[in-house]
């Protein structure tokens, strides 16, 4: 029997725990640069019909909620506080009493057809704003859309009305899993930053925070029965901050169970489910340093400082390993109420198992073919532990090797092949291919970008946006097992919250739109248009987002006989103004305007940049064209 994937509900979250102030950020928007009359909403709604006129939010406006609805009151208060933070207007929340004018009406019991628990209907006209949904999830997402309709230039004052454009929106997500992962195993990030990241996710209607808590280089979650996991396994003496270069400063940290519960509640109030990851059988060095008896060799092991796949993994032939993991998972399950636990399963070298007498005896005793089937045996043992705890589990696509356990979800990271295979076997799949959705990859020319994981690995904003999660080779029925998408921020070379923001955004916005927007509503040029407004929202958030989409990509076609080169430029931005120089000087707002491919005589140094209203938007890119 497969367990249903259920997301967290706001109903059990006390209002006092909800920090309203953050919703100031949601209001910092601007409805500009529209295609036709459609407002710049990210992710793009399923259906948008712009209407003439606008609703004027003023001192007489009220937020009306259903009578006796505790959930409705919480949602109304969220919206009220957000409006106050942004505009200075104090909008009272009252129980709905018949037809009213100059009101924002929240209807939490509406039948909204096939929109599901996350869908909503939003109607804005000259008299009212009507927000209807069958469940509070949908109301919450409708509120995010309302907040994206409020102009960014509205000052914090109650002396003038706020004009919200008239529109009719019917909206619901394409996929149920719209995730973002942060690798806290390799690098520890503060609770304050994790909360900020969850706020950013909610802003984009993302609903799964995949919390990567254990790694070779750090064990980050307090386990009361095994204190050495954090006393020893959460710390290291140095960090590799670029290829082969070490920072000799000791680093580390961990989250107490109380902190983890606090983050779970914080996320649930924003309709984000936290999926914890406890890596096994590989990526386990931090645990084995603390408890070497769980390894195949018995250790001892040294704290790791450099990145890379490690040969030390949990011993599959030792019953103590499964007892340890059962104890750990019992404590994990008690903290995280979501229906899914991530168990890793990736990059587990079999070297130690091949030479381990206990593992070889396990293979013989269980009638297994090889070490790959031993990993399948391992995963199935863990599955039984989780099923007994009424939990389902997900793992990286290596868990397919040797046979898939019956209730497994598969996270397809090595391209789409694992996802296709799992879907054909009727297993639920989350698509997160490294060549599209790994956000530790460069997003522009490496020469003008911060250090990333591999020099040749580039996932531009446009490339991320263009990924289609449902492979064409799947039948309609098989495609139904593709449950969502996820972007992954691995932290080998990402050691500050500011760099996490830079690497994750705006690419996470592209992933959010793929996860939410119907396939036939996705269109790159329109997304780039709406991102111009989203960048303004990011600026108001003071987010350290990447402006790499504005950087110029140069294509050079050199005729070696004449040493004449044809040069063309492009960017990932909307209607870019590209200016360039060929005299070695930095381009300015008065430099040559790019209007199409042009020819130059080699040798020449070309410098280019994107401008908006005379201001340089990205970085200067330079490339020399040499004579043959």
Image: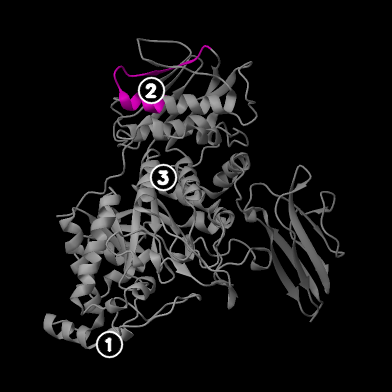
From where the camera sits, is residue 426 visible? yes
Which is more toward the observer, 70 or 294? 294
SS at mark 3? Answer: helix
Closest to the observer, 315 or 50: 315
| Residue at mark 2 to residue at mark 3: CA–CA distance | 22 Å
Label 1, residues with CA under 10 Å away: few <14, some 14-19, many ≥20:
some
Residue 57 colored magenta?
no
Which image quadrant for residue 600? bottom right
Secondary structure beneath dot 1 equals: helix
Locate residue 484 relative to residue 5 in the image: left or right: right
Q: CA distance from mark 1 to mark 3?
A: 45 Å
Q: Nearer the viewer, mark 2 or mark 1?
A: 1
Q: Earlier in the sequence, mark 2 or mark 1?
A: 2
Position of 587 with respect to 75 (left or right) is: right
Which mark is on residue 389? Answer: none
User: 254 and 114: which one is in front?
Assistant: 254
Colouring style? one colour
Tell me where residue 415 appears, x and y as whole percent.
Answer: 41, 67
Which span is picked out in magenta? Answer: 60-76
Residue 62 among those drawn in magenta: yes
Q: Which residue is mark 2?
A: 106
Residue, disc 1: 354
Question: Mark 2 or mark 3: which comes first in sequence?
Answer: 2
Q: Nearer the viewer, residue 572 or 81?
A: 81
Residue bearing the label numbered 3: 516
Q: Are marks 2 and 1 in contact (CB under 8 Å)?
A: no
Q: Which residue is at 74% across, 74% downward?
A: 558
Q: Is residue 120 visible?
A: no
**Residue at x 65% of width, y 26% of height:** 155
């Amino acid at each position: 029997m497969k367990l249903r994937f259920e997301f967290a509900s706001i109903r059990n979250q006390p209002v006092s725990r909800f920090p309203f102030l953050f919703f100031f950020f949601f209001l910092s928007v601007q409805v500009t640069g529209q295609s036709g009359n459609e407002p710049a909403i990210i992710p793009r709604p399923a259906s948008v019909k712009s209407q003439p006129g606008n609703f004027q939010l003023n001192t007489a406006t009220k937020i009306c909620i259903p009578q006796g609805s505790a959930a409705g009151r919480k949602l109304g208060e969220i919206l009220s506080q957000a409006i106050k933070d942004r505009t200075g207007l104090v909008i009272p929340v009252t129980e709905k009493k018949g037809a009213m004018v100059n009101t924002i009406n929240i209807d939490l019991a509406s039948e909204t057809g096939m929109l599901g628990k996350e869908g909503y209907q939003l109607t804005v006209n000259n008299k009212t704003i009507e927000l209807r949904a069958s469940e509070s999830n949908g109301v919450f997402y409708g509120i995010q859309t309302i907040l994206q309709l409020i102009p960014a230039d509205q000052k914090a004052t109650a002396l003038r009305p706020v004009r919200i454009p008239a529109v009719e929106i019917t909206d619901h997500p394409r996929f149920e899993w719209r995730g973002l992962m942060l690798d806290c195993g390799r690098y520890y990030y503060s609770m304050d930053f994790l909360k900020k990241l969850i706020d950013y996710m909610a802003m984009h209607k993302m609903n799964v925070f995949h919390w990567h808590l254990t790694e070779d280089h750090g064990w980050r979650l307090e386990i009361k029965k095994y204190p050495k996991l954090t006393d020893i396994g959460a710390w290291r003496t140095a960090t590799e901050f670029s290829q082969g270069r070490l920072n000799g400063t000791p680093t580390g940290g961990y989250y107490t169970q109380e902190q983890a519960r606090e983050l779970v509640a914080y996320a649930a109030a924003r309709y984000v489910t936290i999926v914890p990851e406890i890596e096994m059988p590989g990526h386990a060095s931090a645990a084995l340093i603390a408890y070497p008896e769980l390894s195949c060799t018995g250790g001892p092991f040294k704290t790791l400082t450099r990145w890379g796949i490690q040969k030390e993994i949990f011993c599959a032939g030792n019953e103590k390993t499964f007892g340890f993991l059962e104890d750990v998972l019992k404590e994990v399950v008690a903290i995280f109420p979501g229906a899914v636990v991530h168990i890793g399963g990736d990059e587990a070298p079999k070297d130690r198992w091949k030479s381990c007498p206990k593992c070889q005896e396990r293979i013989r005793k269980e009638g297994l073919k090889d070490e790959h089937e031993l990993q399948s045996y391992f995963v199935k043992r863990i599955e039984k532990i989780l099923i007994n705890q009424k939990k389902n589990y997900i793992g990286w696509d290596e868990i397919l090797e040797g046979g898939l356990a019956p209730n497994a979800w598969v996270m397809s990271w090595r391209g789409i092949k694992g996802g296709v295979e799992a879907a054909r076997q009727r297993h639920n799949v989350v698509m997160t291919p490294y060549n599209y959705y790994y956000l530790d990859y460069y997003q522009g020319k490496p020469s003008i970008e911060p250090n990333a994981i591999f020099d040749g690995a580039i996932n531009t904003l446009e490339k991320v946006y263009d990924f289609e999660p449902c492979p064409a080779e799947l039948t309609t029925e098989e495609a139904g097992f593709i449950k969502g998408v996820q972007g992954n921020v691995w932290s080998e070379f990402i050691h500050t919250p500011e760099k996490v923001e830079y690497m994750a955004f705006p690419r996470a916005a592209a992933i959010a739109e793929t996860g939410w927007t119907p396939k036939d509503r996705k269109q790159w040029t329109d997304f780039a248009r709406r991102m111009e407004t989203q960048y303004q929202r990011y600026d108001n958030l003071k987010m350290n987002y990447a402006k790499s989409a504005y950087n110029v990509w140069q294509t050079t076609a050199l005729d070696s006989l004449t040493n004449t080169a044809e040069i063309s430029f492009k960017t990932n931005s909307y209607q870019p103004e590209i200016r360039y120089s060929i005299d070695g000087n930095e381009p300015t707002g008065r430099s040559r305007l790019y209007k199409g491919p042009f020819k130059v005589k080699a040798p020449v140094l070309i410098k280019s940049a994107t401008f908006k209203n005379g201001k340089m938007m990205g970085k200067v890119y330079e490339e020399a064209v040499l004579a043959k």
